[in-house]
Amino acid sequence: MPYEQSPSPVAPATGSRVWTVGASGGVAVLVLILAAVLHREAAPLLLSGAVVTAVLTWLINRGAPPAPPPPTAEAQLPPVVVEDGEGVLLGAAFEALEDPMLIVGGGEADDIAGRRVLLANAAARDLLRLQTRGGLLLSAIRDPSVLEAVDEALYGGLDRVTDYTPGGARDRRWRAFSRPLPPSDDGQPLALLRLRDETDARRMEMMRVDFLANASHELRTPLASLSGFIETLKGHARHDDTAREKFLDIMSAQAERMGRLVADLLSLSRIELNEHIPPSGRVDLARAAADVIDAVTLLAQEKGVTVRLDGEAAGVAVVGDRDEIIQVIQNLVDNAVKYSPPGATVELAVQRDLSAETMAADRPDGLARLPLVTPDREGETAYAAVIVRDRGPGMARETLPRLTERFYRVEGQKSGPKEGTGLGLAIVKHIVNRHLGGLAVASAPGQGTAFTAWFPMVKTSAKDAETALAEPLAP
């Protein structure tokens, strides 16, 4: 058996009861600890019972002076024996655990300053700025609920789960798990404290709650309008032909608004679902921009706005999904046409062979530029960009960081004849992020707005490029 208790006539008298770890037992312990490293959720289950007793006794007492001999000469159990090679691996395994983990020792139950960190792995030391061992727990963690949970594990033998918010500039949320451990050789109570970072999960939950609240509000407005006009048409306006035609037109517009909102919500959900899967197709960016201009020409003419394409006419191949890239350009052009005054011109430009440094330094018409999505790619990557420039009212700089939030609209542009669901730029952001590209905005009051979206270009040799241009790209 890996773990056994047996008297030894030659064992040193240590005055304590410890475990013997043989060669096979050491290997078993090592396998369990390494399994905990690979599966973080299994760590608190594996670090328990006899395994914890053997491993932590070696870790805590490593390098400590031997205990004084007892007054009696009775035969004692041999001390923990861990071969040097296995000991190094066990220590490395404990250090490599992703979650911050602390072994806490308790003194007197009524002395809160007696709780000391006997052992902390690298993640815990980095988070709490601890030394390896010996520091006061109260100096590292001041949250009363976490300290109370540790006390219950130390002196009550109870498992506890509580929330931990360390505070500071970064809003981080942690879940603290505390559980009792077998006492040390000298009878000191021990407890294991594990922290799990739930910042992203909490943030996503808040985003979901905000999203549902905003979506319900946006749907409630047209529904209330439709209900009101239906009641009116069923009442005194039943036989008023003029009022009936007017109300029906308004109801039709509200129904179309609801349809656009539902379509955008479905589109956003679909894009977010596949956002972690980068596309692998080939798309001609300039040709996609030309197709968008053809699609919006009639709407732009009705508003008295001209849409013009400058730059490359074709042959700018980028890695992407054609439908999604067209959706990006379409949303940017629709916004530009919407906020352009009659007689103005919306300018589209397509550029190629740009570096990340060039994109960061670019300032359209001298306007200050703010990145909304930054590409996350390593090595030398060439980008192709599409720039949509309008001469509308522009926006103050303090409003720019929030443009890609769902349902956000700039103050002063929330009412009036401007149509939209408030989801267009949020969709653009997620599509660009999926394509490992970038998005930036430059604007100033009275000077219009310029949006720049860029995507990684297809890596091809000169011969391959000539062949690719002769073949049709993704439809």
Image (cartoon, rainbow, N blue to C red):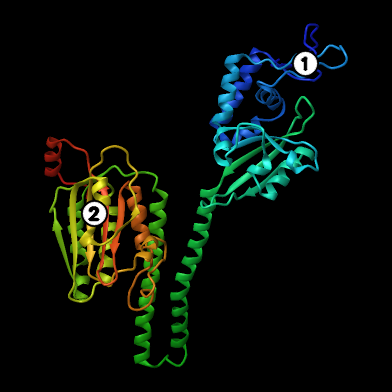
Query: In the shown orientation, is residue 323 left or right of residue 73?
Result: left
Task: For mark 1, give the secondary structure.
Answer: loop
Is 223 placed above or below 156 here? below
Answer few, some or many: residues within 10 Å of disc 1's Cα (few below 14, many 20 plus, some between 14 and 19): few
Foreground mark, 1 or 2, reads 2
Query: In the shown orientation, is residue 155 left or right of residue 331?
Result: right
Q: Position of residue 288 (x, y in %)?
A: 21, 55
Which residue is pictured at 57% across the width and 15% down the height?
85
> Tag 1: residue type?
Gln
> Tag 2: residue type?
Asp
Which residue of the protein is positioned furthest toward the right in this rendering? 72
Q: Position of residue 411 (x, y in %)?
A: 39, 72
Answer few, some or many: residues within 10 Å of disc 2's Cα (few below 14, many 20 plus, some between 14 and 19): some
Q: Position of residue 373 (x, y in %)?
A: 35, 52
Q: Which residue is mark 2?
A: 362
Viewer can see residue 331: no
Is 7 placed above or below 247 here? above
Which residue is pictured at 69% across the width and 40% down the height?
178
Q: Position of residue 461 (x, y in %)?
A: 16, 35
Q: Which mark is residue 5?
A: 1
